[in-house]
Image (spheres, grey):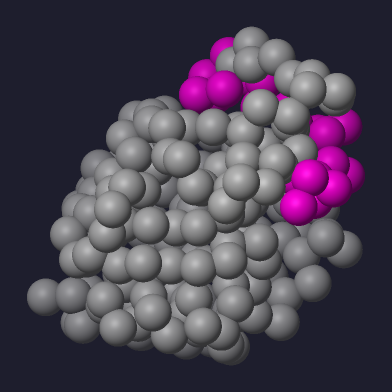
Amino acid sequence: MQNIEPHFSWRDEYIASEDRRSPFYRREYSEFEYTNSIYNYCIHPQWDDFGSSTLYVKILYTDYKTGFTVIEMIGEWNDAINNDVALFKREIIDKQIELGVNKFILIGENVLNFHGSDDCYYEDWFRELNGNVNGTGEGWISMINFRSHVLVEMKQYNVDAYVKLGEEWNDINWRTYKPQDMLAVIENRFDKELPSHHASDSAV
C-alpha cells in the first residue's frame, strides 16, 4: 500500500499545497518518512490526512472560476465509527463550497471499504450545492471508479440519492484526461441522464 501514490500527472497545472485557498496550503511532505497508515499498513506520504484514522485524500485539481474539484481517495470510508463524511465535509468540502466550488469529482479506486451510518451529511451537501448557495443551484457530486462492494454498501445507506455513483460511472479512464477535459466527460454523462442527474426527485 505504501507504493500507491496519488495521481501526479496534473502537478504542472495544480498543487494543493501551493494553493493559498486550499485546506492543505503549505503542507510539507517527506519522501522518506511514512507516518500515516491504514490497517497497520503504511501509506505513501503524499496522501493528505484530514482527521480520519482510515481515510486519506489528495486534492488533484481545483478550478475556482469553473467551480470544480477532483479529489482522489484511499483507505476505508467509515461513517459508522469515525464519521468520516462529517470530517470530510467540515475539513475540505465546506471550505471549497465557501470559495465557489459546486462540482465535486471523487475518485475511489483505492477506497477499500465503506461502512455507512445515515445519509444526513450527503443530503446536506447535496442541498447546499442545489440551494443557490453559489448563485447557480447547479452543483453536483460524482463518485467514479469505486469498487463494486463499496457501491453496494453506499446504496444501502441511500447515498446514491444525493451522489451520482454506480457501475455506469466506473469505466472512466480519467488518467488519460487533462482536468478540464475530465470535467467535460463527467458533465456530458450528466447531460445524457437529464432530468434525473439532479437527485432532487429521489431526495425529497
Residue 73 covered by magenta stretch = no
Residue 151 in the figure: left or right of residue 145: left
Q: Residue at x 72, y 61 (%)?
A: 182
Q: Quadrant of residue 146?
A: bottom right
On the image, the x and y values in percent for residue 59 come to: 62, 39
On the image, the x and y values in percent for residue 123 come to: 21, 61
Q: Quadrant of the C terminus?
A: bottom left
Residue 62 in the figure: left or right of residue 117: right
Residue 5 covered by magenta stretch = yes
- State whether residue 30 is above or below residue 195: above
Given the current orientation, which residue lies at the most extreme left position? 204
Task: Let me know if residue 171 appears in the view.
Answer: yes
Q: Residue at x 19, y 66 (%)?
A: 118
- Front-most of 51 and 66? 51
Given the current orientation, which residue lies at the most extreme front position? 40
Q: Residue at x 62, y 40 (%)?
A: 37
- Front-most of 104 and 153? 153
On the image, the x and y values in percent for residue 76 come to: 50, 58
On the image, the x and y values in percent for residue 110 come to: 66, 61
Which secondary structure type mostly characterizes the magenta part of the structure?
loop
- Front-most of 19 and 118? 118
- Front-most of 72 and 128? 72
Q: Residue at x 21, y 82 (%)?
A: 202
- State whether residue 153 is above or below residue 100: below
Residue 42 in the figure: left or right of residue 160: right
Magenta stretch?
Answer: 1-24
What count of labels does the image hold?
A: 0
Task: Let me know if residue 129 appears in the view.
Answer: no
